[in-house]
Amino acid sequence: MVSFPPCKINLGLNIIRKRSDGYHDLSTCFYPVPWRDVLEIVPAKDFSFSVSGLPVPGSASDNLCVRAFRLLEERFGLEPVAIHLLKILPIGAGLGGGSSDGAYALRILNELFKLNLAKEELRELAAKLGSDCAFFIEDKPMMGEGRGEVLSDIEVSLKGKFLIIVKPEVSISTAEAFASVTPRGAAGDLRSVLENEPVSAWRDRVKNDFEEGLFKKFPVMDAIHKKLYAFGAIYASVSGSGSAVFGIFAKETDLRREFESLVYWSGYLD
C-alpha cells in the first residue's frame, strides 16, 4: 500500500509559556501543503525498513515510521511488514515531514490490517510519536495548542492561493530553536485573525515567535523573507521552528531564478 505524506506550514506560532515538563505551550494553525514524501508499506515475511531519496539522520529504530509500527505491533500483535520511504521533503525545515511520515504510517497500518481505529484514536497514538504528528491524521487546517497535539477545527482557507517555499542550506533542530526564544504569552486571538481578516492583513497581525531569533542567527532566512515580500507575497513567514521560509501569493509566481541554489517548491493550495 502506497501513500503520499504531505507537509505543512504554520500560520502564526505564538510561544505562550514554558511548562513544568520542559515543553512549551503554544498556539498555531497547521495548514496542509501538497508537497509530499512517498511511503510504501506491504506485508512481508520479516520486518524491514529502507529509505531512498534524501538521507535521513538517526537510526532506523528511531524513525517515526518504525516507531509507528512498533506502537501498533505492541497493541495488536501485527504481522511483519516491509516499509520503504522515499524521502523528498527536506529535514530540519519546520515542514513536519517526519511527523507526517509517522502519522501516515499509522493510517496505512490501520487500513492494511483492518484495525478500524477511529480518527480520534489515531490522533492519540500519533501524539505519542511527536507533538505535531496528530495533525497529519487529518486532511484539513487545524488549530494546534498545548504542545501542538491539542487540535481543533478552524475556518481558514487558502484555496487558490499560490505558495512558494524556500529552504536555505540550514537545518534547525526543535531544541535549538526553542533555546533562542522567550515565551511572550498569547499575542491576541490568532484564531480570530485567521478566520476573520484577509491574508493581506496578516503581515502585521500573524507572527511566528521563532522568527526574530532565527533571523538574527541565520541572516539568509531574513533575506529570503524580505525577498518574498519584495516580489509580491501577500504574507510571508517561517514555518514552525525550522529554516523553511514561505510566501503566499495571489497568483502563480515563478521565483526559481531568484533562489536557484536553494531548495524550492511552489504550487497552488487546496
Image: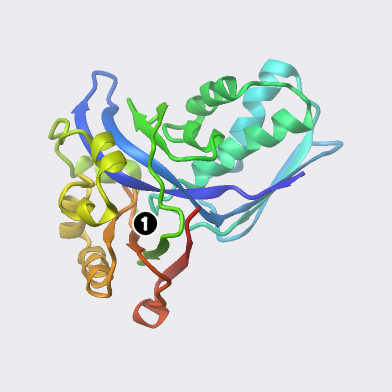
Q: Quadrant of residue 30?
A: top left
Residue 38 position within the rendered picture, expressed as x and y whole percent measured from the top left: 65, 53
- Name the residue tied to disc 1: 171
Q: Residue at x 27, y 71 (%)?
A: 232
Q: Which sits in the foreground, 77 or 13?
A: 13
Residue 95 position within the rendered picture, expressed as x and y whole percent measured from the top left: 43, 50
Q: Quadrant of residue 179?
A: top left
Q: Which sits in the foreground, 135 or 210?
A: 135
Q: Residue at x 36, y 32 (%)?
A: 144
Q: Quadrant of the N terminus?
A: top right
Amino acid type, residue under disc 1 in the picture: Ser
Can residue 61 be spotted in the picture? no
Can residue 122 be spotted in the picture? yes
Image mark count: 1
Residue 111 position within the rendered picture, expressed as x and y whole percent measured from the top left: 74, 31
What colour scheme has been applied to the protein in the rendered image?
A: rainbow
Eyeballing the image, is 109 above or below 262? above
Residue closest to the far bottom: 257
Horizontal side, residue 229 vs residue 245: left or right: left
Mark 1 lies on a secondary structure that is loop
Eyeballing the image, is 69 above or below 247? above
Eyeballing the image, is 234 above or below 42? below
Horizontal side, residue 160 vs residue 169: left or right: right
Q: Residue at x 70, y 36 (%)?
A: 108
Residue 237 position within the rendered picture, expressed as x and y whole percent measured from the top left: 27, 56
Q: Residue at x 18, y 42 (%)?
A: 181
Horizontal side, residue 125 vs residue 95: left or right: right
Q: Residues within 10 Å of mark 1 (few under 14, many from 20)?
A: some
